[in-house]
C-alpha cells in the first residue's frame, strides 16, 4: 500500500505531525544559525576588546624592542583566569611591519622572527590580508573550511605603526556555548511538540472518525441499506456536517423508495391473485350452479333408494363446500347497501364483545363517527369484524385490543391494534394472501377478503409491525362505491 | 581577668626574646636591606619572617626594600637610600670598583660559597654543547646586571672573538634570570644562561617547566651572589649584621629561615671569591 493510500485516520495526524516537526525544526535551525552568528560576533567583540587593551603596551614594548615584555603581555590572556570564557583566544601573534613574528603567545607555533606566511597556508592568507589592509583599521579575516577566525588589529600610535596584533580564535570554542544554547532551544521545541502533537492527534481523530464512518456507510449502499449516521458524532454545521445531512437525506429517500417498491410488488401480486381467483371462481361457479340445481331436482323428483339419497346428500355437501370456498375467494362488493351510521360501528362492538370477553381482553374502543358517512355500511362492518376478530384471536390472553375509528380528510380512518406476538418479515410479506397459513381455524380468507373489499372501495390497508404490537390501518375515501 | 592577660602578654614576650633583649628604640633609624624579587621568588612572607628575625637579632628596626631588578637596587645603594643589598656578583664588583659598596657576606650554597652558570636549551636540542654554537639563534638574557644571565655569556662570546650584539639573530633581556628558563621552555628563545641557584630552585618549585629543558654546558665556578653594604655604612652596623648572618645557621630559627632560602648559611667577606667575576668585567675603570 502506498503512503498516500493510507486512511485519513493516519494520514491527517501524520501530515500534521510532520508539518509541526518540520516547522519546529526550521524555526530552531534559523534561531540556531542566528545564535551561532551572534556567538561569533561576541567572540570577535571580545577579541577587539582584548586587542584594544593590549595594543598600547604592545606598541610601547615594540618601540623599545622589549621582546620579553611583549611576550608577557600576549601570554597573559591565554593563561589568566579571565581567559576562561568561550571566546578565549587560541593564540596571539604580534608581527612587525614586514610581517615577521615579533612575538607570539605560543612561541613554538610561531618562532621569533619567522615570516608570518611561512607558518602555513592560512597564515599566508592572513599576511596577504594584512598587506591589503593599509588603512590602519582592524578587521576579521575568515577563510572557508578554516578552524580559525583571525582578528587583526594594527599596533600603532597615531600615524606611527609598529606592526599588527593577530588574535587567533578557534571556532570550536564556540561549540560548547552553541551546543548549550541549542540544547535549550531543542528542549523548548520538544516541550512544544509534546503539547502540540497530542492535540493534533486528537483533533485529527475527531475530524476523521465521522469521515471514516461516512465512507464505510457509503460503501454499504448497493449491497444493503446502511444504518443512519450517529448525529452526535459530528454536530457542527460545516461542510462535513452538511455532508452528514445530505447522506441522511439520501438514505431516507433510498428507504422510502425501497418500501414503496416492496409495497408495489405486494399489491401487484395480490391484484394478480385476485384476478386469478375471480377467473377460477367464475369458471367453477357456472358448472357448480348446474350441478347443484341437478342435485336439487334429483332430490325432489326421485324416489331413489336410501343408499342413493345418502350419496347424493354427500355430493351436495361437498359441492356446497366448494361453492362457499369459491364464494369466499370471489369477493364481489357489488351489493347495493345503505350508508354507514354511527350505529353500525356500535353494532360491531356489540358483536365482537362476547369473543373479547371470553379471552379476558380489554377492548379500547374509540368511535369518532357521529353522523355517519356515505359508505356502504355492510362492507365497512365486514371489514371491521374481520379485523377485530383477527385481533382478538391474535391478542395475548388478558391483553388488549384497540379500535379507533373516525373520519379525517374525507376518508374513514380505522385503526385496529392488538398486543399479540409480532409477525416475522416473511409472514408480513404474505399477510393478505388467501389461505393464509396464519389462520389456525377457518379458511384463512379473512384478511384476503378484507384486502379485496378495501381495494374495491378504493381505499388502502396497511399492516404495521411494532414490537409487541400489531396495527392495521385502513383508510377508505368517503363517497366511494364498490 | 582581662587585665591579667594584658599584663602577662608583654612580660611573656620579653621573656621569649631572651635575656638582655629589649624592644628596638623607636628613634633609632632602621637598617634598610634591598633585594630583588628574583632572589626570593615572590616569597614575601619569607622576607617578612627574615626581617623580624634580623630585627630581633640586631635589636634595631630592619626594613626590606624590594625592587624588580639589580639596576634599581644598585641605584638605591648609590643614593644611600638603602644600607645593604643582595646583588649579583657582577653588580657587586661594579659597585665595589666605584667604591660605593663593600662585601658583607657570601651565602653558602650546597656547602660552598660558589655558584655556576648553566647554558639552558630545549631538551629537543641535542646538538648544542657550547654557547658558541648558537650563532643565528634567539637568545634570552636575564637581568642586564646579572652575571650568569647577561655578563657571563657576553664575556664568553667576546673571549671566543665573537661580537655578542651580532652573533645571535635576536637577543633580548628579561626582568629576572628565571625568565630565561621560562623563555626557553616556551620556545620564545632557543637558549639562555642562568645561575645554578635559579635552575635548582625552579627545578624544585616548577618541575614541569624544567622538564622540557636540558643543561647544555656549565661555566666555571664563581663567587655566589653576595650581600653588600654601602661603602659608608658604619663599621659597627656592618659588623653586627655580618655577625648575625654568619651565625644564622647556629640557632633553630635562623636555620629554618636558611632552609627556606635554600642556602646553608653565610661566610664572612672574602673579595677573592669574585676575582673571576672581576675578570669578565675587564680591567678596572673600563666602561
Image: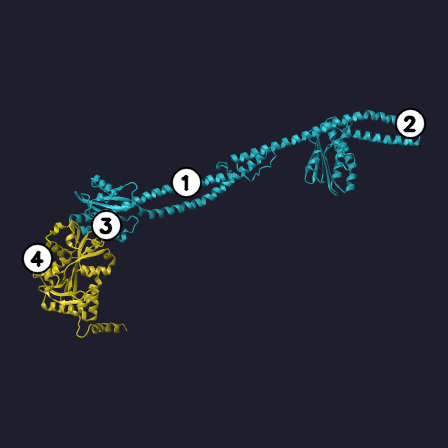
Q: Which mark is residue A108?
A: 3
Q: Name the residue under label 2.
A: A300
Marking on residue A23: 1
Tag in front: 4 or 1: 4
- Kindly report which numbered mark, 1 or 3, lies closer to the viewer in this rendering: 3
The answer as to whether the residues below labels 4 and 2 share one chain is no
Pinpoint residue B281: horizontal percent, then vertical percent.
9, 57
Q: Left or right: where does residue B73 sit relative to residue A235?
A: left
Left or right: A256 as drawn, with respect to B75? right
CA–CA distance between discs 4 and 2? 195 Å
**Whether marks 4 and 1 lie on the same chain:** no
Name the residue carrying label 4: B282
Q: Is the same chain shared between marks 1 and 3?
A: yes
Q: As displayed, is residue B61 above or below residue A312?
A: below
In the rendered structure, find residue B103 and report the number of the disc placed on it.
none
Q: Chain A is shown in which shade?
A: cyan
Amino acid at each position: 500500500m502506498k503512503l498516500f493510500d493510507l486512511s485519513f485516520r493516519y494520514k491527517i495526524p501524520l501530515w500534521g505531525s510532520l508539518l509541526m516537526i518540520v516547522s519546529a525544526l526550521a524555526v530552531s535551525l534559523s534561531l540556531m544559525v542566528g545564535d551561532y552568528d551572534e556567538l561569533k560576533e561576541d567572540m570577535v567583540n571580545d577579541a577587539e576588546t582584548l586587542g584594544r587593551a593590549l595594543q598600547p603596551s604592545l606598541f610601547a614594548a615594540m618601540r623599545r624592542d622589549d621582546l620579553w615584555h611583549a611576550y608577557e603581555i600576549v601570554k597573559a590572556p591565554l593563561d589568566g583566569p579571565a581567559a576562561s570564557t568561550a571566546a578565549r583566544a587560541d593564540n596571539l601573534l604580534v608581527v612587525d611591519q614586514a610581517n615577521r613574528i615579533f612575538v607570539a603567545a605560543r612561541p613554538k607555533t610561531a618562532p621569533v622572527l619567522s615570516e608570518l606566511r611561512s607558518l602555513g597556508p592560512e597564515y599566508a592568507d592572513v599576511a596577504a590580508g594584512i598587506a591589503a589592509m593599509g588603512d590602519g583599521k582592524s578587521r576579521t579575516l575568515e577563510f572557508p573550511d578554516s578552524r580559525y577566525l583571525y582578528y587583526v588589529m594594527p599596533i600603532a600610535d597615531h600615524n606611527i605603526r609598529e606592526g599588527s596584533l593577530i588574535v587567533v580564535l578557534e571556532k570550536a570554542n564556540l561549540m560548547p556555548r552553541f551546543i548549550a544554547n541549542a540544547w535549550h532551544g531543542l528542549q523548548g521545541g520538544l516541550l512544544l511538540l509534546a503539547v502540540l502533537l497530542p492535540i493534533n492527534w486528537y483533533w485529527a481523530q475527531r475530524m476523521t472518525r465521522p469521515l471514516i464512518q461516512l465512507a464505510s456507510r457509503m460503501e454499504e449502499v448497493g449491497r444493503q441499506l446502511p444504518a443512519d449516521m450517529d448525529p452526535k458524532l459530528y454536530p457542527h454545521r460545516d461542510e462535513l456536517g452538511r455532508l452528514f445531512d445530505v447522506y441522511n437525506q439520501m438514505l431516507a429517500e433510498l428507504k422510502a423508495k425501497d418500501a414503496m417498491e416492496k409495497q408495489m410488488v405486494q399489491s401487484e401480486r395480490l391484484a394478480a391473485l385476485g384476478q386469478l381467483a375471480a377467473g377460477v371462481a367464475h369458471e367453477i361457479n357456472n358448472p357448480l350452479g348446474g350441478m347443484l340445481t341437478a342435485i336439487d331436482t334429483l332430490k325432489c323428483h326421485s324416489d331413489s333408494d336410501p343408499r342413493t339419497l345418502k350419496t347424493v346428500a354427500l355430493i351436495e355437501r361437498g359441492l356446497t363446500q366448494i361453492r362457499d370456498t369459491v364464494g369466499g375467494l370471489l369477493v364481489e362488493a357489488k351489493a347495493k347497501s345503505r350508508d354507514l351510521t354511527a350505529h353500525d360501528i356500535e353494532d360491531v362492538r356489540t358483536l365482537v364483545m362476547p369473543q373479547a370477553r371470553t379471552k379476558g381482553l380489554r377492548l379500547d374502543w374509540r368511535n369518532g363517527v357521529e353522523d355517519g358517512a356515505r359508505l356502504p355500511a355492510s362492507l365497512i362492518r365486514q371489514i371491521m369484524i374481520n379485523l377485530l376478530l383477527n385481533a382478538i384471536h391474535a391478542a395475548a390472553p388478558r391483553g388488549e385490543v384497540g379500535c379507533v375509528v373516525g373520519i379525517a380528510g374525507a376518508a374513514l380512518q380505522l385503526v385496529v391494534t392488538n398486543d399479540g406476538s409480532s409477525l416475522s418479515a416473511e409472514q408480513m410479506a404474505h399477510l393478505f394472501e388467501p389461505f393464509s397459513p396464519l389462520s389456525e381455524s377457518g379458511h384463512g380468507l379473512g384478511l384476503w377478503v378484507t384486502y379485496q373489499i378495501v381495494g374495491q372501495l378504493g381505499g388502502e390497508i396497511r399492516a404495521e409491525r411494532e414490537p409487541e404490537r400489531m396495527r392495521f390501518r385502513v383508510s377508505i375515501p368517503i363517497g366511494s362505491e364498490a | 581577668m582581662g587585665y591579667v592577660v594584658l599584663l602577662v602578654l608583654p612580660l611573656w614576650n620579653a621573656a621569649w626574646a631572651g635575656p638582655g633583649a629589649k624592644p628596638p628604640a623607636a628613634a633609632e633609624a632602621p637598617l634598610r636591606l634591598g633585594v630583588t624579587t628574583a632572589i626570593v621568588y615572590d616569597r614575601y612572607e619569607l622576607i617578612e619572617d627574615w626581617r623580624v628575625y634580623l630585627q630581633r637579632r640586631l635589636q634595631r628596626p630592619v626594613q626590606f626594600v624590594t625592587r624588580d631588578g639589580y639596576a634599581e637596587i644598585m641605584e638605591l645603594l648609590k643614593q644611600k637610600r638603602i644600607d645593604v643589598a643582595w646583588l649579583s656578583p657582577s653588580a657587586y664588583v661594579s659597585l665595589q670598583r666605584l667604591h660605593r659598596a663593600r662585601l658583607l657576606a657570601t651565602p653558602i650554597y650546597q656547602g660552598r660559597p660558589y655558584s655556576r652558570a648553566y647554558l639552558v636549551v630545549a631538551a629537543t636540542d641535542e646538538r648544542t654543547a657550547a654557547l658558541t654554537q648558537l650563532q643565528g639563534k634567539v637568545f634570552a638574557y636575564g637581568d642586564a646586571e646579572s652575571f650568569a644571565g647577561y655578563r657571563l655569556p657576553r664575556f664568553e662570546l667576546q673571549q671566543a672573538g665573537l661580537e655578542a650584539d651580532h652573533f645571535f639573530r635576536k637577543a633580548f633581556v628579561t626582568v629576572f634570570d628565571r625568565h630565561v628558563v621560562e623563555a626557553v621552555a616556551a620556545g620564545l628563545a632557543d637558549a639562555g644562561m642562568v645561575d645554578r641557584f635559579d635552575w635548582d630552585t625552579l627545578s624544585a618549585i616548577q618541575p614541569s617547566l624544567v622538564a622540557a629543558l636540558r643543561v647544555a654546558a656549565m661555566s666555571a665556578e664563581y663567587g655566589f651572589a653576595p650581600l653588600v653594604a654601602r661603602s659608608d655604612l658604619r663599621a659597627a652596623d656592618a659588623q653586627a649584621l655580618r655577625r648575625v648572618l654568619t651565625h644564622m645557621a647556629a640557632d633553630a630559627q635562623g636555620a629554618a629561615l636558611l632552609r627556606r632560602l635554600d642556602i646553608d648559611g653565610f661566610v664572612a667577606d672574602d673579595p677573592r671569591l669574585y676575582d673571576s667575576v672581576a675578570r669578565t668585567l675587564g680591567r678596572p675603570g673600563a666602561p
